[in-house]
Image (cartoon, rainbow, N blue to C red):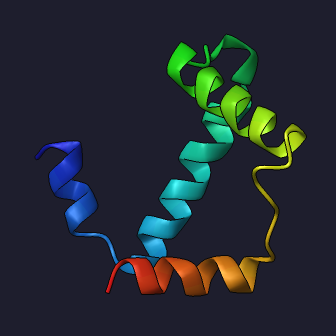
Amino acid sequence: MSVIEQIHQLTLQEKLIAMEAIWDDISSVEENLEIPQWHKDILNEREQLIADGKARFIDWEEAKEQIKQAVK
């Protein structure tokens, strides 16, 4: 049985525990992870928009509401 098939058989709680364990393992070696250039470019662009006053921060509740409205 493949790992994917085994995952499909897990309960939600077991899947969440597995995800947390995988994330803990990945993040323990983060110095070996390379950030893709496209990701750096997006972050730099957003930082520049904030510096230019063309973007603003909003609180999480407002962000969630905007996301809900956008996906309707």
When the figure is inspected, residue 36 is found, relative to residue 14, above or below; the finding is above
Please tell me which residue is depicted at 31% across the width and 87% down the height of the picture. Answer: 72
Depth check: 43 or 1 in front? 43
Q: Nearer the viewer, residue 71 or 2?
A: 71
Residue 39: image location, x then y, percent = 57, 27
* Picture quadrant where residue 22 is located: top right
Is 71 or 17 nearer to us in this picture? 71
Q: Residue at x 55, y 80 (%)?
A: 66
Q: Is residue 59 left or right of residue 13?
A: right
Q: How many marks?
A: 0
Q: Is residue 53 above or below residue 40?
A: below
Q: Residue at x 62, y 17 (%)?
A: 33
Left-right relation of 28 to 10: right
Residue 49 in which image quadrant? top right
Where residue 40 sits: x, y (%)? 64, 22
Q: Is residue 15 left or right of residue 46?
A: left
Residue farthest toward the left in the current orientation of the protein: 1
Residue 46, percent from left and from top = 71, 39
Q: Residue 29 at what x, y percent from top left?
A: 70, 22
Residue at image location 61% in from the left, 22% down from the top: 41
